[in-house]
Amino acid sequence: MDRLTEMEAFLRVVELGGFTEAARRMGLSKSAVSKHVAALENRLGARLINRTTRRVSPTEIGLAYYDRVARVIAEAAEADAMVGAMQSTPRGELRVSAPVSFGIRRLGPIVADFLLVHPDVSVHLVLDDRFVELAAEGFDVAVRIGRLPDSSLRARRLSETRMLLVAAPAYLDRAGRPRTLDDLARHQLLHYSHLSTGNVWRLPAPGGQEREIRVGGRLTVNNGDALLAAARRGLGIAMVPCFFLENGAGAGLEHVLPEIRPEPVGIWAVYPPGRFVPPKLRAFIDFIAAALRPGGQGASEPPPQGMEPQHHQARANQDGGRVRREAQG
């Protein structure tokens, strides 16, 4: 028999002074309650209740046992109530992983707003550009950018971001400004080691085809801000998400091949498999998705106007027109 049910049967008999009332309270038959109490006494090897034809009362041992059992049953009921509440109200701690640059520029402010709305939730936000192992490292959810590898994890697309090719004017003055995708082969291409496509840039080519440009520059970094800093110092051309360049971060950089518009990459929430999604996690993912929607407080913005090449703008426009006509024809 169920040990907790045996304890509850004994508790109700003592509280209510008899098997009949205990059975009514528990929704069981009188004989079932009697069997539960007898099984408990047999398991403990002690008489807990004095039974007479007129009344039921606890023995000395039974009275001492009753005090402990009352606390156990109360805590069990409280635990059940807690689970019910957690299934309807977001509460508890969330461990969240996100790329460093995205976490600083976008996710950090969104998390702060989320916590203001959900006072019973706490968030442990870990910013790391590597792909963490969710289950092994105890994460509830990870925000990832780019193409997702095949896995058993569940994923929800939150938003997307455009990718841009950027470089310092000093580098382009020295190495020349690429006018076509083929020109990239003679340039230093800065490699972001956590790029979802490895050491390959996938860029649209005339005719609607996709070109794979192998990235083999002298610098490989595993952090987006370090990549942007290297481009700003004139080490080569970098491919970065649009949000990297907001709030003045694109100052001192030129938009390379502005007519080339790579497919936007997805921003994803990745979380463990399973049919049940805790309310705290569901609320968190919904909140991020709403914030990143167009018009949301964390939504993507177009690149600053200063990113467009200036003293070479006319040539870029001409080349862009030529490429677009080739693509159409």
Image: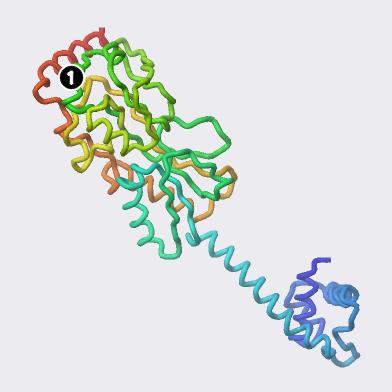
Relative to 72, is 58 above or below? below
Residue at image location 37% in from the left, 22% down from the top: 201
Relative to 239, is 80 above or below? below
Label 1 packing within 10 angstroms: few (<14), some (14-19), many (20+): few
Q: Which residue is mark 1?
A: 174
Relative to 55, is 82 above or below? above
Residue at image location 53% in from the left, 54% down from the top: 278
Q: Is residue 163 left or right of residue 195?
A: left
Looking at the rendering, which quadrant does residue 240 occupy? Answer: top left
Looking at the rendering, which quadrant does residue 58 occupy? Answer: bottom right
- In which quadrant will I find the N terminus? bottom right
What colour scheme was applied to this rendering of the protein? rainbow
> What residue occupies the far bottom of the structure in this picture?
54
Who is closer to the viewer here, 274 or 142? 142
- In which quadrant will I find the C terminus? top left
Looking at the rendering, which quadrant does residue 13 occupy? Answer: bottom right
Q: Is residue 229 shown to the viewer in this render?
A: yes
Who is closer to the viewer here, 99 or 191? 191
Relative to 199, is 323 above or below? above
Q: Amino acid at mark 1?
A: Arg
Q: Position of residue 318 (x, y in %)?
A: 14, 14
Q: Is residue 30 left or right of residue 111?
A: right
Who is closer to the viewer here, 230 or 276? 230
Q: Position of residue 187 (x, y in %)?
A: 28, 17
Q: Position of residue 295 (x, y in %)?
A: 26, 44
Who is closer to the viewer here, 18 or 298? 298
SS of the residue under disc 1:
helix
Residue at image location 33% in from the left, 42% down from the top: 101
